[in-house]
Image (cartoon, rainbow, N blue to C red):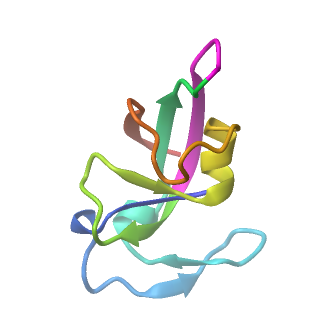
Amino acid sequence: MSAAVSGSLFNNAAQWVPSCLPDKRYLLNDPICMNKCVKITYKCVGCSAAKTLTVPINNKCPECATNHVDLSTDAFKWLEPQGGTVGIAKDATITYINC
């Protein structure tokens, strides 16, 4: 699970490099991708309580505003198990944190 955040938060000179993660996935060598996560709190449709998910930032979303997060499909489905409209979750609280 992961998140992409606003392209305005990135250094345009950032390069894709292999990570030290077990799967060796590539990450942008940019400060926003280095030990930074987003914590999302969201009450899904039909859920009795809000859920909180923390995922690492590993990509940029050039068209996203700073208050918008583009989640991987598995992260979105964890927050919204009924599927909803993929990519749209209203009234979520997004917090940028160190992870």
Is 22 in front, or is 52?
52
Q: Count of labels shown?
A: 0
- Is 16 situated above or below 4? below
Q: Which residue sits at x=51%, y=29%? A: 42
Q: Quadrant of residue 98?
A: top left
Q: Quadrant of residue 56?
A: bottom right
* Left or right position of 86 against 95: right
Residue range (magenta): 46-56
Q: Which residue sits at x=62%, y=37%? A: 79
- Is 20 situated above or below 89? below
- Is 82 situated above or below 63? above
Q: Is residue 17 visible?
A: yes
Q: Quadrant of residue 23?
A: bottom right
Position in image of residue 50 (x %, y %): 57, 20
Is 65 in front, or is 54?
65
Position in image of residue 39 (x %, y %): 49, 38
| Quarter the N terminus occupies | bottom right
Report if residue 48 lies within the magenta region. Answer: yes
Is 10 in front, or is 75?
75
Position in image of residue 9 (x %, y %): 25, 63
Q: Which residue sits at x=44%, y=64%? A: 33
As drawn, the residue found furthest toward the right would be 22
* Left or right position of 41 against 62: right
Q: Which residue sits at x=50%, y=29%? A: 41
* Left or right position of 14 against 34: left
Report if residue 75 lies within the magenta region. Answer: no
Position in image of residue 45 (x %, y %): 58, 26
